[in-house]
Amino acid sequence: MKHDFSNVTAGGPLRVGILGGGVAGATVALRLADLGIHSVLIEASNGLVNGPPICHLHAGGNLYRDISDEQCLTLLRQSIASVRAYPHSINRRPTVIATPVSDAGNAEALLPRLAQVAREYQRLVAEDPANRVLGDPEHYYRCYSRAQFEALANRPLPTRPETPDDWMIPLAHHLDPDSLKFPLILVQEYGWSLFRMAATATLALNGSPHCELHFDTRAMELQHTRDGWLVHGRDHQGQARQFRVDFLVNACGFRTGQVDDMAGYRRQRLVEYKAAYLARWHRAEQWPEVIFHGERGTPQGMAQLTPYPNGIFQLHGMTDSITLFKNGLVASCEQSAQPRLPQPYQAQLEQGWQSPDIESRTRGAIAHLARLLPAFNDAEPAGKPLFGAQQIPGTDPRLRAADVSFEGMNYARVEIVKASSALTAADRIVGRLGDLGWIEMTDLPLSPSLALTEGQSAAEVEREALRLARERGYPDELALNME
């Protein structure tokens, strides 16, 4: 692979400005730094990868029944690339997809899609063995009939799960088969540690000479110059800062519209406020992630149980009283590219949650899971929620696979909905720089692997992840490797 980044602009070596240090901005900075392209990353908070709750890869879109097969295959490819870029951030345990009898859906409806995704995964592994990051392609998913599931209830709980059956045994001990439609589906949909992602990016970018990190700094005004952009910012002490860049990447997440407004661009988008909750359930066994399908926005909305070490679970419930929020999905307008969330949600984003809200909504999430898993009623709240707002470009709230769009010669906006799309966005930005003649490239596409992250050890990533979790006030378990 040949790359020549010695090209210069009128003002000297190419400088790419990145506004926002979330998953999108950090991943763009990683890709650029790995290629030796200089970036200036400006982030309003004090660290990288603060944002909406992330807990799994979405490798194949199996958690969504209403998205297209094309989106599912895109998410699979993007997830494989993301594992290779963030090799020490994955929690390797399967996910079980269950359809309750209370749900109108057909438990077999996902099977044609799963077969298609498995075939694509097998093709990708044959194309490049390094893509084998989701386990054996021939065992990407497995179905369990009622008889098979009931037979597992007679087997003892394993000390350490090693087979698909081992992972299913805790469910067989605790779930009433009369409450479920069959088959149950076990799929190699892995967990993704937000804190180990943040640690990976922090270690790599702090150690790179090709990235300037400016934390606690917010862009206040953009000036489009003849040969680039002048970013007028202000740090947390109120000091004015200026940054000259040749190409500007808007990676501000749900605030992307604010930067579009400053740049003078219009773009339709949605923003949705969401939260996930933490509970401690004193069970000795190791659990897979469990998805109980349900109709979004109803009291029977999807319930999601995501395991971490030592009995910590992250909970989602797709109802307005748990993960979703009343009037929490808002759209942009003709006057502004930035959707406006209701003031209480905006206040939570900026100031954090109050204890009564944490207690009541976490208790609600526990009760939502306990409808189908009665023993979970013993769980207790285990910390503040993981919360944030998610942008969705366009007007379709079902969109899940999106990456980047461009304006003019030197402006890109990263519009990822799922974190696994971030590397695709970064690679498209690199390609854009090549198309504009600012860098010379051959032998595309780029490898998903990054030298900056491949050289890290699992132990150093976990140490940094623990530091970040404690600094941000979350349990250690969210940073720990499950293996």
Image: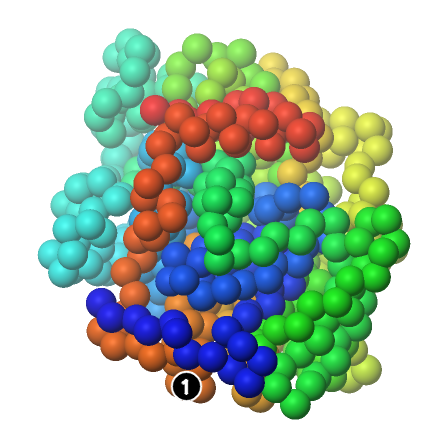
Q: Quadrant of residue 356?
A: top right
Around disc 1, counting alpha carbons within 10 Å, would you say few (fewer than 14), some (14 to 19), or many (20 or more)? few
Relative horizontal placement of residue 294, taking residue 453 as reference (left or right): right
Residue at 22% across, 26% down: 163
Instruction: Label 1: state its secondary structure.
Output: loop
The residue indicated by pointer 1 is 437
The answer, for residue 269, to whether it is visible in the render is no
Instruction: Tell me the quarter of the image containing the C terminus.
Output: top left
Locate residue 124, reporting x and y percent.
19, 58
Relative horizontal placement of residue 139, taking residue 448 as reference (left or right): left
Q: Nearer the viewer, residue 80 or 311?
A: 80
Taking the view exactly as shown, the residue that stands out farthest to the left is 126
Locate residue 418, reporting x and y percent.
50, 56
Relative horizontal placement of residue 123, taking residue 232 as reference (left or right): left
Instruction: Tell me the quarter of the image containing the N terminus.
Output: bottom left
Q: Disc 1 residue type? A: Gly
Relative horizontal placement of residue 314, taking residue 240 as reference (left or right): left
Q: Quadrant of residue 424?
A: bottom left
Locate residue 369, reporting x and y percent.
57, 30
Residue at 27% across, 44% down: 134
- The relative height of residue 472 versus residue 173 in the rendered view (above or below) is below
